[in-house]
Image (cartoon, rainbow, N blue to C red):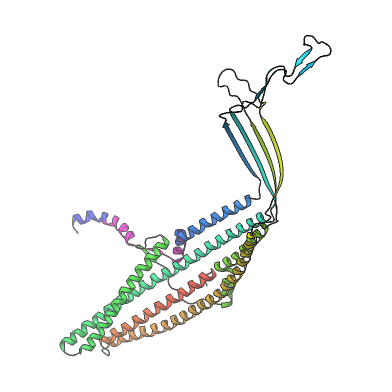
Amino acid sequence: MTASAHRALPFILLLAPAVLGQSQAQALTLDQAVELARKNSDAIQIARLAVQKSRAALGEARGRALPHLDFQASASYLINPPPGYTVAPGALGTFAFPIPVPPFSTTIQLPQSNFNVGAALHNLFSVTATLNQPLFTWGKIRNAIELASLQLDAAGTDMSARRRDIDMQVRRSYFSALLAGRSRDVLKRLRDTAAEIVADRQKGFDEGTLNKESLLEVKATLASLEAKLIEAEQSQSSALTGLGVLTGQSMDDLELATDFSSSLPSLDEQVILTLALEGSPEMAAARSQAERARRRLSIEEGGAILHPDVNFGISLDVSGQEDFPYSGAWTFSNNTWNVDVALTLGIKMSAFDGLESLHRIQQAQKDIDMAGVALSQETKTLRIQVRQAIETARKGDAAAQAAIARSEYLEEKLRNATVALANGQASLEDRRKASLEAGSAQLDLLLALYDREAALADIQRITGERP
C-alpha cells in the first residue's frame, strides 16, 4: 500500500458509516403508515373541525336557555330644541294674605318670576339595560339543545367514518405497492429467462434447426413479460405515490416492512354482522338522522299556532339632558334626568300563520318516515356487504392456498429440472421453461395474497376491528 493510501485510510473509514447510513432504507410498517396517514389526512382534519363547530353550536343552543343582558347607550344633539313657553309673573293669578306678614307683601303673584315650561337643551343622553329570561317555550329550547347534541354525535360519527376510509386506503395502497414490487422482481427474472430462450432459438433458427413459429412463440412470451413488467413498475410507482400522499412521507428511502398475512383468521359471520350493526358509522349516522328528525318535529310542534312563549324581562332606562360648560361657570343639575325600572312578563304566539306551521310539521313527520326507511335500507345493505366481504375473503384464501400448493409443486419441478440438467438428463431450455412456470405461479400467489388482504381491509372498514 502506498503512502498516500495510508494517509487516506482514516478519512475513508470515517466516511464509510455516513455513506452506508445514507443508502440504508428505513423500514415502514403498516401500522406506522396508518398512524401517519391519520395525522396527515385532510379529510380527517375537516371532520375534526366539523366536530369543533358542532360543539360550538351546542354551546350556542344551550345559551338560549340562559338570561340575555342587552345594553344600549346613545348621545344625541338636537339642532332645534323646543324653546318651550314662558309663564309670566301673575299669569296664574295672585294670592293675598289676610294678615300682613312682614317682610312679605300682602299680595303674591303666581308665579313670582318668569317660569319656562317645555324647553329642552341641545343634547340628549339615554342608557338602557335589559335582562330577558325565557320561562316557557313548549320544549323548543330543550329540543334544540338535544338536536345540537345529536349533531355533535353525528359529526363524531363522520370523523370515525373518515378515519376508517383512510385506514382502508392505506392498507390497499400499502399491499398494492408490496404486490407490484414483488411482482416486478419476479417479472424481471422471467424476462431475463425468456430473453435467453429467445437468443437460443434465434441461433437455432439462423442455423436452420428450428422453424420460425418456435422463434415467434418465445418472442411473444418475451413481449408479454415486458408488458407485464412495465405494468408492475407503473403500478408500484402509483401505489407508492398514493401511499406517500396519504402518509405525507417521501417513499424514496422507505422499505415496506409488513408482509402479507400468513393465513386467514377465523371469520364468524354472525359475530362480524353484529359488530358491523353496532359499530358501523353508516348505521350510527342513520340512527342519528332518525333521532334528529324526531327532535325537529318536536321543535316544529312547539312553534305551532296558539303555543305562547312566556318571557320575563327587567329593563333599566336612564335618560336626560345636561348643559355642558361651553363657556362660563357650570353647575350640574339633574332636574332633567329620569330613571325608570320596568318588570315585564310577556307572552308571544302566532294566532294564524297561513298554515305554514302545519306544513312544517308535516314535513318533519315525513323526515321521520324517510329516516326510518333509510335505517332499514342501511341495515339490509350492511348485511349484503358483510356477506360479500366474507365471501371474497374466503375465496381469496382458497385461491391463495391453491396458489401456494401450485407454487411449491413448480418450485420442486424447477429443482428437479436443475438436477436433471446437471446430470445431462434435461436440456437447458427445459430448465428455463420450468423457471418460467415457477415464476408464473409466484405471480398468481402474490395476486391471491393481495386479494385476501383487500377483503380483510373491507371487513375492517365495516366493523372497525381487524379480523
Above or below residue 327? Residue 434 is below
From the top left corner, tell me how far across and down residue 130 is, in percent: 65, 41
Is 406 positioned to the left or the right of 218 in the image? right
Q: Is residue 354 left or right of residue 170?
A: right
> Percent x, y for residue 186?
33, 76
User: x and y percent of residue 36 in the render?
Assistant: 45, 60
Q: Is residue 421 above or below residue 263?
A: below
Q: Quadrant of residue 114?
A: top right
Q: Main secondary structure of the magenta part?
A: helix
The answer to whether residue 35 is left or right of residue 136 is: left
Residue at 28%, 77% in the rendered image: 226
Quarter of the image with the N terminus in it: bottom left
Where's residue 380, x and y in %?
Answer: 57, 75
Q: Is residue 134 above or below residue 329?
A: below
Dividing the picture into quarters, in which one does residue 379 lie? Answer: bottom right
Question: Is residue 280 found inside the magenta-colored segment of the image?
Answer: no
Please count the marks in the image: 0
One can see residue 162 in this view: yes
Q: Residue furthest top?
A: 102
Between residues 385 and 461, which one lies in front from this camera angle?
A: 385
**Residue that lies at the very extreme toward the right in this rendered image:** 99
Q: 335 and 230: which one is in front?
A: 335
Which range is magenta?
A: 12-35
Left or right? Give the position of 133 relative to 200. Answer: right
Q: Residue at x 37, y 61 (%)?
A: 250
In the foreground, 327 or 467: 327
* Residue lying at 60% horizontally and 68% vertically, measured from the top left: 371
Residue at the far left in the pictured view: 207
Tell me, yes or no, whether the highlighted magenta stretch contains residue 29: yes
